[in-house]
Amino acid sequence: MTRDFSCGGVVLEGRSVLLVRVANFKNKKIWTFPKGHIEEGETCRQAALREVREETGYNCRVVSPLLRVGYRYAIAGEVVRKEVQWYLMDHPVRVGKPDPAEILEVRWAALENTASLLHYPSDHHLIDLVREILETKNGGASARRRSEKHQP
């Protein structure tokens, strides 16, 4: 079994979230969140910020760790155990264009409209967490979220 680790960002602007459209391993076009591998010398947080910038053209600020997701998939007959550390991000500033080699499209979507767009169960779980954080924040409590594992 191969192990794989990535870092990514769930970027908020008000009640909208930044999504990327990519072709997955089965060449199906899906909406998801920007993520990627850590490069030498990077922390997970730095990798998440870089991947968001490269895949969307937006510089952002990390608000807090959001969730660590673990899942398995098979590719070319080999099982891969993947983990992704997600960060909640805000203050997006457009600084460039998405990487056309990886990203088919970038869009902002209202949180309320993401259920019909997102493909992966873990992405739906991330949106649920973001909604909880916003509700808590609007209630006056802290929006901090601890990292936790979730099996989709």
Image (spheres, rainbow, N blue to C red):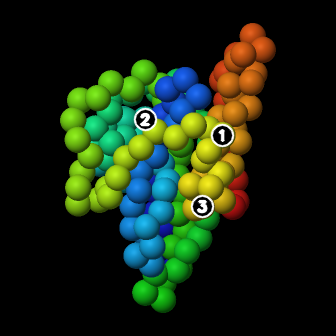
Q: Which mark is residue 120?
A: 3
What's the amino acid at mark 3? Tyr
- First along the sequence among labels 3 and 2: 2
Whether residues under marks 1 and 3 lie with C-beta atoms below 8 angstroms apart, the answer is: no
Q: Nearer the viewer, mark 1 or mark 2?
A: 1
Q: Which mark is residue 4?
A: none
Query: Residue 4, image x and y in percent?
Result: 46, 63
Q: Nearer the viewer, residue 107 or 55?
A: 107
Q: For residue 120, which quarter of the picture?
A: bottom right
- Which residue appears at 65% of the width and 51% of the height? 115
Q: CA distance from mark 1 to mark 3?
A: 16 Å
Element carrying mark 3: loop
Q: Nearer the viewer, residue 92 or 152?
A: 92
Vertical placement of residue 66 versus 93, above or below: below
- Which residue appears at 24% of the width and 51% of the height? 99
Query: Residue 141, image x and y in percent?
Result: 75, 14
What's the amino acid at mark 2? Arg
